[in-house]
């Protein structure tokens, strides 16, 4: 059984930083791309960042580029999202997801991921 568990969310002031973590078990983590998505209240889920299985290919949404950094530690079966220069519009529930297929480069499309975490709330105050 695959488990995906996010942690690290919280309340932070605008301009601050947070690091999200996502631990995966039940799947050979090192062979799957990972993605971070977010969903703000009243809005659709949107892509934030993705990283391929080896951590070589990374993609960011324009809205977070230059402020967020995705990384992974295959030895710890964990993917991270370092978030800096946070803005109130970054307030959302952040979800981690495991790619549906092995050895892919990562995708901006949620349909390309088949296991999701329960989400972690990030709230940025102005």
Image (cartoon, rainbow, N blue to C red):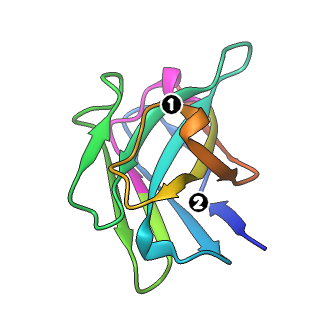
From the image, tell me which residue sits under label 2.
8
Going from the N terminus, do you reach mark 2 or mark 1 first?
Answer: 2
Is 80 placed above or below 65 here? below
Residue 29 in view of the camera = yes
Q: Position of residue 123 (x, y in %)?
A: 62, 36
Q: Which residues are magenta?
A: 81-91
Residue occupying image coordinates x 37% and y 53%: 104
Residue occupying image coordinates x 47% and y 83%: 76
Is 83 placed above or below 31 here? above
Residue 90 in magenta stretch: yes
> Decide: marks 2, 1 in contact (CB < 8 A)?
no
Q: Position of residue 103 (x, y in %)?
A: 38, 61
- Image position of 84 (left or right of 14): left
Occupied quadrant, residue 25 = bottom right
Helix, strand or loop at disc 1? loop
* Total marks placed: 2
Q: Which mark is residue 109?
A: 1
Is 81 placed above or below 4 here? above
Residue 10 in view of the camera = no
Report how far apart the C-alphas of labels 2 and 1 lie in the structure. Answer: 24 Å
In depth, the one of 67 and 104 nearer the eye is 104
In depth, the one of 21 and 33 nearer the eye is 33
- Quarter holding the N terminus? bottom right
Q: Residue lying farthest top?
A: 42
Q: Position of residue 17 (x, y in %)?
A: 40, 48
């Amino acid at each position: 059984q695959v488990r995906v568990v996010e942690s690290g969310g919280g309340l932070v002031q605008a301009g601050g930083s947070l690091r999200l973590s996502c631990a995966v078990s039940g799947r050979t983590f090192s062979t799957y791309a990972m993605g971070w998505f977010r969903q703000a209240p009243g809005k659709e889920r949107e892509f934030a960042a993705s990283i391929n299985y080896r951590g070589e290919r990374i993609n960011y949404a324009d809205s977070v580029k230059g402020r967020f950094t995705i990384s992974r530690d295959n030895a710890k079966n964990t993917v991270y999202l370092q978030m800096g220069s946070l803005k109130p519009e970054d307030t959302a529930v952040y979800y981690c997801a495991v790619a549906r297929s092995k050895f892919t480069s990562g995708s901006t499309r949620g349909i390309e991921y088949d296991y999701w975490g329960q989400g972690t709330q990030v709230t940025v105050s102005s």
